[in-house]
């Protein structure tokens, strides 16, 4: 359409020019020479035709210029379309589009081709997006599969923990930080081994963990799946106590509790009796980041002493033993008044192994306790105000 308009313009321009020329001749020439006129007209029209042809070629571009990009056509690779010819480059481009979009090049005009090319490009963009989405979906499926198989792995190890998943640094981290990591991983039975053996110049090592044992084994790197209720023992150090020396100097009068010499430091029982859990005294501790909980089980008196160290706690509960022995269960009964009573149960975690004690409270929560020096515990107790139940 655009090319036809141009052609009409050229035609009317030619007609106007011829009219002007003829009238100018008849007006100005007195001796009219027909031969000369013919020659002039023929010369003139030849020039006009040449110019028109050139202008037409350039405007319509039928065979010399690409109908789409306007580049001069070469000798090879041209291709006819409805309103012109495509250059080599456009031919290649539109041939592949026409094959993908299923249309015949020869039946499309340049404007239609340009529109189709836009549509094709949008489709390609969509296809590319689709590929990206497909790739993401594939990745999700892949990782989903992985996490599925890892959850299967977890199921297989129900109530176990992959110890290699806990990252920590010995000789750098504090016991609080490491305790938190083991608790977060799911361990429930975490205890501490605190040695008050650091000289003053090693103050920076206070609270720093230098060893961890799981069920008494410190080669954790060689372990993989570990039971959740395994005993995790975290070892750290405190400064050497100076207090003891001061205390000894100040406390000239002997402490009210005499020093016991048992087979183990946590009991005054001898070798033949300490596993029975039904006589003498036993001393246990449970440590967390805030407090030390002490239990002194005194079969001689028939009482259990329970107190907290830390945070300024000054009282100690004294609760009567109602029944039992530690290999089975010792029941202690708190009695607030006639109607309000509640029981705690105490027993060795494993029969005949006094080093690990379980306390079950009135809500049936269980707490782990471990042996601690009896004389030290008694000294601490004696500084407390005793509340008898
Ligand atoms: Zn072209």
Image: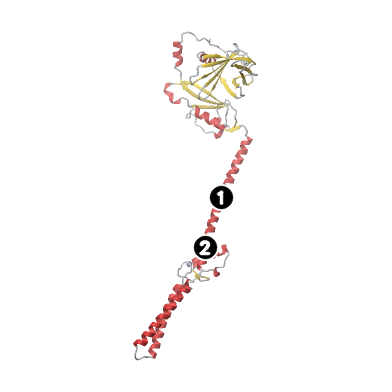
> Would residue 224 be visible to someone looking at this image?
no
Task: Give the structural element (helix, strand or loop) at label 2.
Answer: helix
User: Disc 2 vs disc 1: Cβ atoms closer than 8 Å?
Assistant: no
| Residue 253: % across, % down | 47, 8
| Residue 175: % across, % down | 50, 27
| Residue 220: % across, % down | 55, 30
82 horizontally vs 152: left or right: left
Q: Residue at x 54, y 65 (%)?
A: 95
Is 56 or 252 nearer to us in this picture? 56
Is 170 or 15 nearer to us in this picture? 15
Task: Say which mark, if any, is on residue 117.
Answer: 2
**Quick one: label 1, few (<14), some, or many (20+) residues within 10 Å?**
few
Is 33 or 265 nearer to us in this picture? 33
Task: Give the structural element (helix, strand or loop) at label 1.
Answer: helix
Q: Which residue is disc 1 drawn over?
A: 135
| Residue 260: % across, % down | 55, 11
Q: Earlier in the sequence, mark 2 or mark 1?
A: 2
**Whole-number angstrom distance, CA of label 2 to CA of label 1:** 27 Å
Q: Residue at x 52, y 63 (%)?
A: 117
The quadrant of the picture occupied by the C terminus is top right
- The image shows a total of numbered marks equal to 2
Residue 156 figure quarter:
top right
**Can you say whether 32 is above or below 218 in the image?**
below
Is 334 or 181 nearer to us in this picture? 334
């Amino acid at each position: 359409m655009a090319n036809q308009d141009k052609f009409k313009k050229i035609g009317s321009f030619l007609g106007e020019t011829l009219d002007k020329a003829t009238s100018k001749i008849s007006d100005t020439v007195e001796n009219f020479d027909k031969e000369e006129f013919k020659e002039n007209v023929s010369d003139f029209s030849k020039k006009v035709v040449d110019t028109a042809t050139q202008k037409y070629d350039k405007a319509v571009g039928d065979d010399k210029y690409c109908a789409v990009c306007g580049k001069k056509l070469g000798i090879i690779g041209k291709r006819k379309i409805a309103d012109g010819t495509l250059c080599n480059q456009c031919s290649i481009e539109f041939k592949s589009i026409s094959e993908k979009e299923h249309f015949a090049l020869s039946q499309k005009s340049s404007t239609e081709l340009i529109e189709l090319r836009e549509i094709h490009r949008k489709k390609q963009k969509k296809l590319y997006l689709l590929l990206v989405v497909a790739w993401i979906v594939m990745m999700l499926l892949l990782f989903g599969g992985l996490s599925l198989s890892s959850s299967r792995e977890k199921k297989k190890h129900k109530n176990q923990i992959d110890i290699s998943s806990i990252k920590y640094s010995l000789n750098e981290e504090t016991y609080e930080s490491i305790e938190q990591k083991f608790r977060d991983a799911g361990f429930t039975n975490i205890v501490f081994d605190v040695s008050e053996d650091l000289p003053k110049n090693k103050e920076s090592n206070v609270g720093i963990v230098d060893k961890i044992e799981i069920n008494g084994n410190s080669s954790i790197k060689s372990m993989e799946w570990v039971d959740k209720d395994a005993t995790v023992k975290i070892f750290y150090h405190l400064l050497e106590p100076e207090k003891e020396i001061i205390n000894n100097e100040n406390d000239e009068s002997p402490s009210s509790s005499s020093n016991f010499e048992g087979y183990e430091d946590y009991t005054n029982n001898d070798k033949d009796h300490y596993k029975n859990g039904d006589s003498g005294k036993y001393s246990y501790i449970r440590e967390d980041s805030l407090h030390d909980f002490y239990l002194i089980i005194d079969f001689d008196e028939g009482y259990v002493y329970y107190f907290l160290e830390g945070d300024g706690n000054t009282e100690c509960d004294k609760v009567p033993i109602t029944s039992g022995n530690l290999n089975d269960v010792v029941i202690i009964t708190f009695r607030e008044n006639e109607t309000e009573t509640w029981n705690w149960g105490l027993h060795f975690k494993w029969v005949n192994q006094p080093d690990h004690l379980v306390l079950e409270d009135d809500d049936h929560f269980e707490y782990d306790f471990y042996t601690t020096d009896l004389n030290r515990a008694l000294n601490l107790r004696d500084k407390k105000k005793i509340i008898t139940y």
